[in-house]
Image (cartoon, helix red, strand yellow):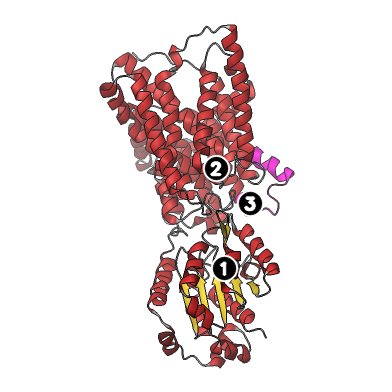
Amino acid sequence: MEAKKRYVTGFNGLRTLGVLAVILYHLYPQKIQGGFLGVVLFFVLSGYLVTDSLLREYSSTKKIRPLKFWGKRAKRIYPMLLAVFLIVSPYLFFFQQNQMKGLRSNFLSSIFMVQNWWQIQQGSSYFADAAGESPFKHIYYLAIEGQFFIFWPLIMIFLVKVIRSKKHSFLLTNFLAILSLILMIAQYKVGQDPTRVYYGTDTRIFSLLMGASMAFIWPMNKIPAKLNKKGQTFGRNLLWGVLALTLILYVFMPAQSPVTYYGGLWFVSLLTMLLILLVVHPGLKANKIFSNKLFDYIGSRSYGIYLWQLPVFALVAAKVVHPTSWYNVIWQLALIFALSEFSYRFIERPLVAYDYSNLWPWLMTKVEQVKQEKWRALPVRVILVSVLVLVSLVMILTSPKSPHDQQVLEARIMEQQKALEAANLKAANARVSTPLKTIAEKYGVDPVVAERASKMQIFAVGDSVMVAGSTNLQEAFPRMTIKAVVGEQVDGGATILAENKEAVKKADAVLIGLGTNGTLTVGDTNYVAKIMEEIGDKPVFWINNQMPRPWETNNNEQLEAMAKKYPNLTIIDWHDLSENQSSWFYSDAIHPKDQGAINYTRLVLENMTKK
């Protein structure tokens, strides 16, 4: 028989702390910069609790039963996860069709617990518009936990059967955690979107492992209850110190700071371990401090609150002008808690306790009733839920492909990239024979503008945005040499310019389109200034950034500042022209297509041909 679990009420207080931090981050990412760290608390606490549970099971039965463990986890995770998708999908279908794109992939990757890897593969950014874009991107957290839950009981069998020593298991688990941290440090690149290391199981699992390791040396049921006054004083002081430092980091640790990924997340995991250690100790008052009716209420519903908060914030942000005004925040929070309460009472709690061995016979009984035309005898709630499930599943499974799949975009860009790599100036001239009048009409400019452009020798450096518009650019500027590369960074662009000094010297002007993939300052180097110093007095035209990326504003402000410093630098304001013009872009809201590419080129024409 499994040893009786000790119930620690303070854990709900910790869950409250974590979920409120996440909510505040999604509402005010600029003010509560470290609110995303609430997820670290969930990771560490989950690692501790599941490992403690498995150790208690082994202590009582000398067995660890993975199937039983997986069943309990599935009963806990899936009902609420499915409910969120099934309830949100009809709303998207009727009111926000643009969010239907990619819903099927989002749903299936979530069900199979690989949503974090799917988002990485799609190039999604967790930090671009934290309360916008996808209402389901926060499910990466469940995917990482789900993958941990799949493998951890198997690893635990190895630890208890082969390693045996709890001390050695503690050390080995922390060794694995350090390896994960090293992977994070190695893969993080300063100045680039950190989503890959933030979403990756390999780079985030150290938090779960650190929590798990603590269960070997600090099991809930075996901590001495008595503690002398000196120990109590030390524990109380440590608690307030750790809690204060944790809250400070929740407010001030930036999501994209190198400090966060060069050990910051590990340090917060360590602080969380200490919080758990103190709360679980029966001889300290930490548990009492984190135990009250409010914390118990929020903490017991924290899973539902976490799942509902981002769909509410994301979907409201798309419809409401000032979603973070206090009056709008109040009703959004009320809606989140109402949805959480409803799902807790009628979905989470009943289905966690439900005996699923009865599900198939129950379904067959209801099917038989329908076959015998006795469907009127079915409870109304059964009919309503069945209709909701069927309709929602049809909506999900027939939804358009993910906007991040972008097969058309990828095919077009790759085709243009190959053309650019193969092209030289002579070949480009041979290809372009469009009459100037046709060019002028197509791009909506005066014929004199098209004529000037046809004579200009331009050297262009850019990233995939320029690649997407390269066909149009070369049509309008037949003597333009384009060195644009998918995924190019500003430092790579500087290298291209340095390697093509002679071509730059011969050019009448230089066109630059960089900044989509990272900041214009990398480390301590301001690459705009560096590029301008190397180019000298030659006219430089820099297309500013339009993309849902957190460095967009900083890049554009930096370009404006540099234009004041360098008289020969002109900023082509693509951001202002294309703002709120979603039809100009592929669904990633970054790469121009069709009319967008034409307008992109027209803007370049108008700026570069001014006398």
Crowd band around label 1 with a 10 angstrom C-alpha radius: few (<14), some (14–19), many (20+): some
Give the image location of residue 437, x and y in percent.
56, 92
Type of the residue with mark 1: Ile
Q: Indicate left or right for 289 with 214 as reference.
A: right
Residue kind at label 3, given as amino acid type: Ala
Is the N terminus in the top left, top right, bottom left or bottom right quadrant? top left
* Region rendered in magenta: 315-335
Main secondary structure along the magenta-highlighted residues: helix
Q: Which mark is residue 259?
A: 2
User: Which of 136/520 is in front?
Assistant: 520
3D distance between C-alphas at marks 2 and 3:
30 Å
- Residue at image point 41% right, 82% down: 424
The nearer-to-camera label among 3 and 1 is 1
Q: Which residue is identified by label 1?
A: 531
Mark 2 or mark 3: which is in front?
A: 2
Residue in the picture at 41% in, 54% down: 121
